[in-house]
Amino acid sequence: MLALALGALVFGFLLFAISVTREDVNGEDKADGIVVLTGGDLRMEAGAKLLSEGRAKRLLISGVNRKVTRREMQHLLGLDAKTFNCCVDLGYEALDTVGNADETRTWAKNNGFVRLIVVTSRYHMPRSLAELALAMPNVTLLPFPVTPRRFPETAWWLHASTTRVLVSEYLKYLPAVARLAAQRVIDWRDDRSVAATLPKRADG
């Protein structure tokens, strides 16, 4: 039994690693807002580019270091003052991915957004989508994964540092996706329970 469980864990990791290292063509979908989860290079640049292309109305940078000012962030994003001041929000509260999800939920709710483009590193995307879906089950999430500069284009297993990152992220992803699956089962059961108690409609 232990060997079977270990085999399933290893097989799951291989599927995870293959999926997050595969280069996908990002679509041209538009959304209400764009959320960038800080913590890796090229994420903010990608978010700013999407905003400049008119892919959404507003941009949230979630998990900003409290020492970073709006002026410094504008410089980092490379946006003109008009675009930055009208359409960019900075979130300073999030300390981790769960915090990102909570911060994004508040921002989306305050703005009435129901469709978001999510920008984060490729290996971080599965866990981010799971946590965001837990926090905002009724919001459509459109992934826009970014490949970090130092991430190998091929043969990730030959790079010890990359393998460590992937293993760490996979182990963090498992409980997140388990919580999401459990929540969806609970919601499904609740829906069936409510439906079962509704009075039958009389004919005629």
Image (cartoon, rainbow, N blue to C red):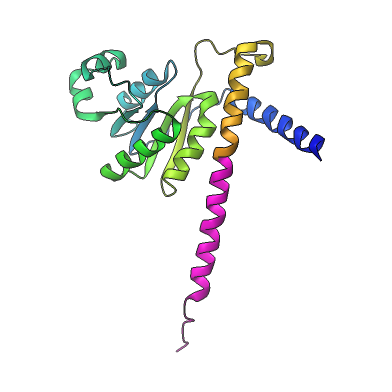
Is residue 49 left or right of 9 when viewed as pictured?
Answer: left
Q: Could one spot residue 22 in this view of the protein?
A: no
Is residue 133 left or right of 44 when viewed as pictured?
Answer: right
Q: Which of 104 and 35 is in front in this view?
A: 104
Q: Residue at x 43, y 29 (%)?
A: 96
**Residue 141 sits in which quadrant?**
top left
Q: Which of 88 and 28 is in front in this view?
A: 88
The image position of residue 68, as x and y in percent, is 27, 17
Q: Quadrant of the N terminus?
A: top right
Residue 106 drawn above or below residue 163: below
Q: Which residue is drawn at 51% across and 57% down?
A: 187
Question: Can residue 142 be found in the magenta stretch?
Answer: no
Q: Nearer the viewer, residue 74 or 190?
A: 190
Q: Which of 114 and 127 is in front in this view?
A: 127
Magenta stretch prevailing secondary structure: helix
Q: Quadrant of the C terminus?
A: bottom left
The image position of residue 118, as x and y in percent, is 42, 32
Q: Residue at x 24, y 29 (%)?
A: 87
Q: What range is drawn magenta here? A: 177-204
From this viewpoint, which residue is outermost toward the bottom? 204
